[in-house]
Amino acid sequence: MKIAGTTALALLAPAMGLMLILYVIPLGFYFVNSFHLFRDGRILPIWTLQTYVNYFTDAFSYKIIGESVQLSLLVTVLAIMIGYPVAYALHTRVRGSGMRAVVSLLLFSPLLVSVVVRTYGWFILLASQGLVNTTLRAAGVLTEPLSLLFNFRGVVISLTHIMLPFVIFPIYSVMGRLDQSLKEAANDLGAGWWQAFVRITLPLTMPGVVAGALICFTLALSAFVTPRLLGGGRVQVLPLMVYNNTVEINWPTGAVSGLTLLLLSIAAVWALNAVLKKLPSV
Amino acid sequence: MTNPQARAHGAEVEARSITKRFGRVVAAQSVSFVISGGEFFSLLGPSGCGKTTTLRIIGGFEVADEGEVLIDGRPMGKTPPNRRETNMVFQRLALFPHYTVFDNVAFGLRMKRLSEEDVRRRVGDALDMVQMPGLAARRISELSGGQQQRVALARALVNRPRVLLLDEPLSSLDLKLRLQMQEELKRLQRELATTFIYVTHDQGEALAMSDRVGVMDGGRLLQVGPPMDIYERPTTRFVANFIGDANLIDGTVEALGDGTVMVRAGRHLVGARRAGWEQVGTRLTVCVRPERIHVGDRGAAPDTLSGRIEDRAFSGHMITYRLALDDHRLHAAVPYQSGTPLYAIGDEVWATWDPQQAVVVANE
Amino acid sequence: MSTLVGEREVRSEAREAWAQGVRDALLRTTLAVGVGFILLPLVIVIVYSFSSVAYGVFPPPALSLKWYGHLLTLAPFREAFARSVAIATAATAAALISGLLGALVLVRARFPGKELLRGFLLSPIVMPKIVLGVGWFIFFARLGLQGGIVPITLAHIIVVLPFIINILAANLIGLDVSLEEAAQDLGASGPTVLWRIVLPQIRSGLIISGLLAFIVSFDQVESSIFLTRGENNTLPIEMFLYMEKWQDPTIAALSTLLILFAGVVVAAALLVARGTDLRRMITR
């Protein structure tokens, strides 16, 4: 059924209407604020670039940006390092569509539950008398409880956990599309398991890894709940700054922070997409 | 049949009672054959008959549940593919998409840790052999189907395997290209004297290229022999039907003569070459190829069949008639030249054949 | 064919089998550990909800149902739950309708700049939610429309719309157009074709995207936190604020109930989608 002219416009109207009124305009208001100034506890609705200048000449801003990027990078790398083997194990060692569905559902299940609940779970796990510390002490690895809560470490661990399903599934789906006979051909030509993996499987599953990295990095960059609840105020990332600024009515600085966050996300998406295009597709 | 120098290169391959099950499906059942070194051997059959499974077992990609594979007399056991002296050309070619032509062909040599100098030389030779010189730097996606085919071949042959396994490699090519590649494969095999084991469902292909053909159906190996034997003397109904066209007439043995057997099929009495296991009263099937049937005006010899032309098809060099005789349908193929008498639909004709040109197969 | 060669082969074959066995064990362990790691926080929350003490100790010294009892006395959570369900349902419904129509245009219509339009409609996914949250705060404040569930619902529509459009567009692309042409040939009008031919075919897409939208809306925190004022909190925000002050197992009890709720919703969706290609999508 072809759709043309006025029909197309009519069908598009609801979605576009919603988007224009509830998306473009609010964002417009938001970024307009970045050109205002905040002084003495009030917003001065004048047009100026002073807020930008203040923000980008403040070393503190760079500390926050650095911490945000560092957190996201670390989480992405960890999630890939854990997620890739899990995806590989799921792809090669689980047989039968029933079992695959069950395991996939289990890996996916945390996403069905609020991030607040998941963060809370980590809160319990990472407490000084929580499961992690108790187990490590019982195993003799630690003599004193490790401080995993209310600091960077705890945020990294819990955020990695939250990101794992987002990393596992793109990798798993690319593996599924990989031609089985490629591995057999490599074997036939004399490659053992390791050679075949390094030369054939790994390069050809890279698109999945990059896609997963893209999702993970951008989600981690804009994560709010987890750094806020588990960071104890010591983890200063951009979303938290936006929140704090807004609550303190310093909307101009909040807007500049938010813009920085958005630009970082876009830069990451753009860069990783460029990498994706260069990879051979399966 | 085999090249006297074959023992220097091609290996002898023996399958002993290979049986393989996938769940409740028996893919291969007691398959046994011996392929001489340097022979071009085809496994022929419809999809699902077990030919690919057997090939994969020989290559080491599957392990047989029962029976074993011996190459040059040595049992292969569970040896994985990377340690067998076989190489495979896969059905979907399995060329590494992220490597150039050169790196694809060089792969096996690099696994053997040859010096880069040797690698370069041998890859060049291999590409020359499949007539693709100068394309070494291309990416796989830039090649045509025929070219990819040759690269897959080169990649396997560059390793000088003693047995080359080919899994329906030409099925994705168009007719012209396929015929061309068939000729090339045959030429290569003669030159290299490597043992070729070729799997296909196309009987024309198998008959054209092979020294011997093994026909499979439902997991069982039904008949093995040179192409002409398979064609002229099928031993089962399936083989008769699968190879070429066959007219199959069920009947009962009425008389045994000197080298001939007369079979009663309803109103008709037909003759075939005597196999030796028939007795008067045995129920069996007579198989006669369409091109062996003579069609003419009504005659009255005892072993002619009378019937009516039901349909007629013209294909350039041949006319195929469909004859209706009581409850039988016979297809007769008559070579056509100007001057050949032409029968119309509805004409009453007689059909006959030289009994020595027909065979009997057992009822299953 | 000396015995020396045979021996060497036998030994390396054994080594190969051993290596394969090690790989096997490692991979299975990895999968088990991976699944365990992923489920760990949820499991611990459930266990913790039955703990007899208020602080984070593992293993809990004794079991108790008192936190569930405490939960039932807290009216704000009950109200917040009802609010979240209402908002998620309304937002999902609105997004499904407008998203379906939009997806139809994206897939079937031809015009310049279509890729840009697609990028625009899908962009909220990339937008940091906190940025959107502040934007909506300012927007609704300017309009004087603070409080109640309407602003939150409107915001959630925008949040879930791109997910729905993405999934429905993917479903629509795979359809056989000749079915619709046959219907038109037999006299069906546009809306009829949509209702009777297109919709039934994308049933599984509608269910999956609806489910996803509901879950995403239900889970929203930073996009909505500035639109709530204490008397109209959604459930995750209510939990979030509670967690900032107290960390006793009441939240664990609530979380356990939410996990159950999520399980019920998914099971219901799977039942409705039984026999459609939904199952195939999951099992691939």
Image (cartoon, coloured by chain):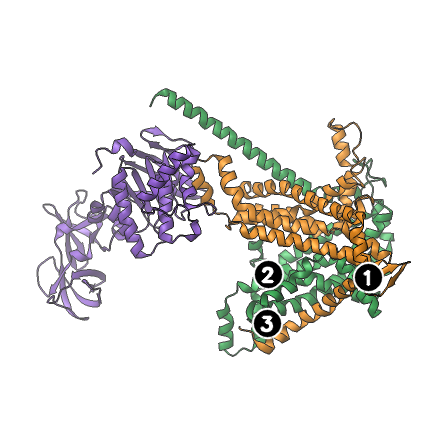
Chain colours: A orange, B purple, C green
Secondary element under disc 2, as helix, strand or loop, is helix
CB atoms at circles 3 and 1 under 8 Å apart?
Answer: no
Query: Which residue: 49% across, 36% down?
Result: A195
- Front-most of residues C46 and B197: B197
On the question of residue B274 being in view, the answer is: yes
- The CA distance from mark 3 to mark 2 is 15 Å
- x and y percentages locating residue A214 in the rendered image: 64, 50
| Quadrant in which the N terminus of chain C appears | top left
What mark, if any, has residue C204 been given in the picture? Answer: 2
Disc nearer the start of the sequence (3/1): 3
Residue type at mark 1 is Leu
Residue type at mark 2 is Ser
Which residue has dot 3 on it?
A: C195
Whether B117 is drawn above or below C159: the answer is above
Q: Are marks 3 and 1 on the same chain?
A: yes
- Indicate which label's residue lies in the foreground, 1 or 2: 1
Secondary element under disc 1, as helix, strand or loop, is loop
Residue type at mark 3 is Trp
CB atoms at circles 3 and 2 under 8 Å apart?
Answer: no
- The CA distance from mark 1 to mark 2 is 33 Å
Query: Which residue: 74% across, 32% down?
Result: A135
Disc nearer the start of the sequence (3/2): 3
